[in-house]
Amino acid sequence: EPEVTQTPSHQVTQMGQEVILRCVPISNHLYFYWYRQILGQKVEFLVSFYNNEISEKSEIFDDQFSVERPDGSNFTLKIRSTKLEDSAMYFCASSVGLGRTGELFFGEGSRLTVL
Amino acid sequence: AQKVTQAQTEISVVEKEDVTLDCVYETRDTTYYLFWYKQPPSGELVFLIRRNSFDEQNEISGRYSWNFQKSTSSFNFTITASQVVDSAVYFCALKEGNQFYFGTGTSLTVIP
């Protein structure tokens, strides 16, 4: 069964360092998303991406964050200068489209720990 | 205001008991979608069910059943004859347009 894959599964970094989280969405999906979940809290929307551009983003997704689809298969989330509060599980998701086909398929998450 | 409210933070049941997880949502859209996801201790999010706003028919899938009531803006999830493997955090979510809103989750512990 096709699945969304994410790397790394866990990354530990020092505050102020840049981090890139990688995702390979399901191959025929057109919409891509990043969500985050601070430990023990709810899943929060960060950004959605369609047709090589951001379609929506939340207040959390400030100038420190950027997304890219560099090569038609990978979908990356970059955090430019990490802060302690960026420590969370980051989930990538993809969907075929909107409407009836719009359910999200999530990757297994990348746990980011900022020290 | 919360778009999706899961009032039960934690629930513990003994194996083989039935358990219902509550979900109340808020939206002004006439077309929307509701979902339940399971997050086991390993951390991944597993899709369980999608329901659109025009389909209030209840659904049963094995030991799982869902009760969608537009009149009360609720989309409750019942696990019948619970098993230890059902222990997880369960998230209800609302999809409006292209954005998902998750509830805070209900942590279910099934005691053997």
Image: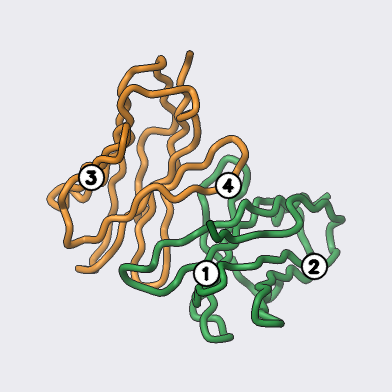
Chain colours: A green, B orange
Q: What is the x, y in percent for residue B31? A: 23, 68
Circle 3: element type: strand
- Chain letter of mark 4 equals B
Which amino acid type is shown beneath numbered disc 1? Ser
> Does label 3 or label 4 sit earlier along the sequence?
4
- Chain letter of mark 1 equals A
B4 lies above or below B87 = below
Mark 2–mark 4 distance (CA, rounded to whole Å): 26 Å
User: What crowding class fits label 4: few (fewer than 14 Cα within 10 Å), some (14-19), or many (20 or more)?
Assistant: some
A73 lies above or below A92 = below
Is circle 3 on the same chain as circle 4? yes
Select label 4 or label 1 by which is in front.
4
Q: Choose top left, top right, bottom left or bottom right for residue B90.
A: top left
Which amino acid type is shown beneath numbered disc 2? Ser
Which amino acid type is shown beneath numbered disc 4? Glu
Q: Using the image, tell me which numbered label, if any, was put on residue B44.
A: 4
Select label 3 or label 4 by which is in front.
3
- Please indicate whether residue A10 sits to the left or right of residue A75 in the image: right
Residue appearing at x 52%, y 67% in the figure:
A94
The residue indicated by pointer 2 is A81
Q: Choose top left, top right, bottom left or bottom right for residue A73.
A: bottom right
The residue indicated by pointer 3 is B59
Q: What is the x, y in percent for residue B75? A: 26, 46
Q: What is the x, y in percent for residue A98? A: 37, 73
The residue indicated by pointer 1 is A58
- Please indicate whether residue A38 sits to the left or right of residue A87 in the image: left
Task: State the residue lying farthest toward the front.
Answer: A1
